[in-house]
Image: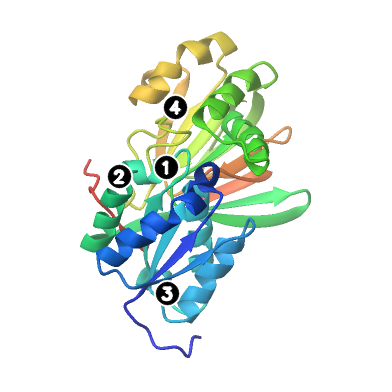
């Protein structure tokens, strides 16, 4: 446990590479806005993947209980994982905010957090908080089982393949919505649907699966609404299963992914549950909050009201 006293200052974790370098390029402007709004803070810049997890752990040990991610959804995911893998305090004692500088910024979109820095800093200054559920995905890397917490949306199958390809480009310094959309369309040519067993609320069913999305949030992939009715504080995961859909039908249905009506499609099933288990007859890859993970078998569960978030606009069903 921490020996440092708890205080009211903010700890800001900056990903300088987020948004093709916007994190670094725009930091002076962002920090100036924070200072002008009398937000007392300490900031650290990540230098490698996974370091935001370490910084979040250190921050709680040093008495910080208000953490801010300056980056994209992946940076926020790392901050959340740092908070949930430390033993200095309960995660429910911590509040998390975000200044979006990534390419997708899907979590912030749901909470009305502006991409204009002035607006995002204003949200922090107002410091309105609410409890937020946290998802947990258990998966495998080879024969080794691992787990990852997620705050927004996790995916299996086609979605995870697109994320995997996009992250390879991102690691080479190329990141944009256009690249994501290109990877989405090009992956359609090679992707094969996988026979899977899904267990929800103790009931098991089998089908060919194109993709599965599991969410606390509503947006992913730069504005797609894979789990369009998800609520971040209902203690349940929204589950969207796209079954045996052809390539042509997927392309024709892209509009439904963006306008929030994907659940109306006859080959799409929607569920709400606190647990989902998925096994498959061949490897199906997983992702969470846009971070590439391992593969099936996987299990999704939820931690109700696991953390507090700083929001601009509260989602009401």
Residue 301 seen from this side: no
User: Looking at the image, is 88 positioned above or below residue 205?
Assistant: below
**Residue at 61% across, 31% down:** 162
For label 1, the residue is 105
First reached walking from the N terminus: tag 2 or tag 1: 1
For label 4, the residue is 269
For label 2, the residue is 114
Along the line of sight, the residue nearer the viewer: 111 or 139: 111
For label 3, the residue is 90
Q: Kindly report which numbered mark, 4 or 1, lies closer to the viewer in this rendering.
A: 1
Q: Label 3 neighbourhood size at 10 Å, few (<14), some (14-19), many (20+)?
A: few
Name the mark on residue 247: none
**Mark 3: secondary structure:** loop
**Residue at 49% across, 36% down:** 213
**At which x and y percent is residue 15?**
52, 55
**Mark 1: secondary structure:** loop
């Amino acid at each position: 446990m921490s020996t440092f006293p708890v205080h009211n200052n903010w700890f800001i974790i900056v990903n300088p590479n987020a948004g093709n370098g916007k994190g670094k390029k725009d930091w002076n402007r962002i920090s100036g806005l924070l200072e002008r709004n009398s937000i007392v803070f300490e900031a650290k810049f990540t230098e490698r993947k996974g370091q935001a997890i370490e910084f979040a752990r250190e921050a709680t040990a040093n008495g910080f209980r208000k953490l801010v991610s300056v980056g994209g959804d992946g940076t926020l995911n790392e901050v959340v994982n740092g908070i949930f893998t430390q033993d200095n305090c309960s995660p429910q004692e911590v509040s998390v905010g975000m200044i979006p500088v990534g390419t997708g910024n899907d979590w912030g979109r749901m909470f009305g957090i502006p991409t204009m820095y002035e607006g995002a800093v204003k949200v922090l200054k107002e410091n309105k908080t609410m409890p937020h559920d946290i998802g947990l995905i258990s998966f495998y890397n080879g024969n080794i089982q691992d787990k990852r917490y997620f705050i927004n949306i996790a995916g299996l199958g086609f979605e995870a393949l697109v994320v995997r390809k996009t992250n390879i480009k991102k690691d080479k310094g190329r990141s944009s919505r256009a690249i994501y959309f290109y990877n989405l369309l090009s992956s359609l040519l090679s992707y094969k649907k996988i026979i899977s067993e899904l267990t929800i609320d103790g009931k098991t069913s089998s089908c060919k699966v194109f993709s599965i999305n599991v969410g606390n949030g509503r947006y992913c992939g730069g504005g797609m609404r894979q789990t369009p009715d998800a609520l971040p504080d209902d203690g349940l995961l929204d589950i969207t299963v796209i079954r045996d859909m052809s390539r042509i039908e997927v392309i024709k249905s892209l509009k439904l992914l963006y306008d929030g009506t994907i659940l109306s499609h006859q080959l799409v099933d929607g569920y709400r549950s606190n647990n989902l288990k998925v096994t498959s007859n061949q490897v199906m890859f997983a992702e969470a909050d846009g971070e590439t993970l391992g593969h099936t078998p996987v299990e999704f569960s939820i931690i109700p009201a696991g953390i507090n978030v700083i929001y601009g606009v509260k989602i009401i069903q």
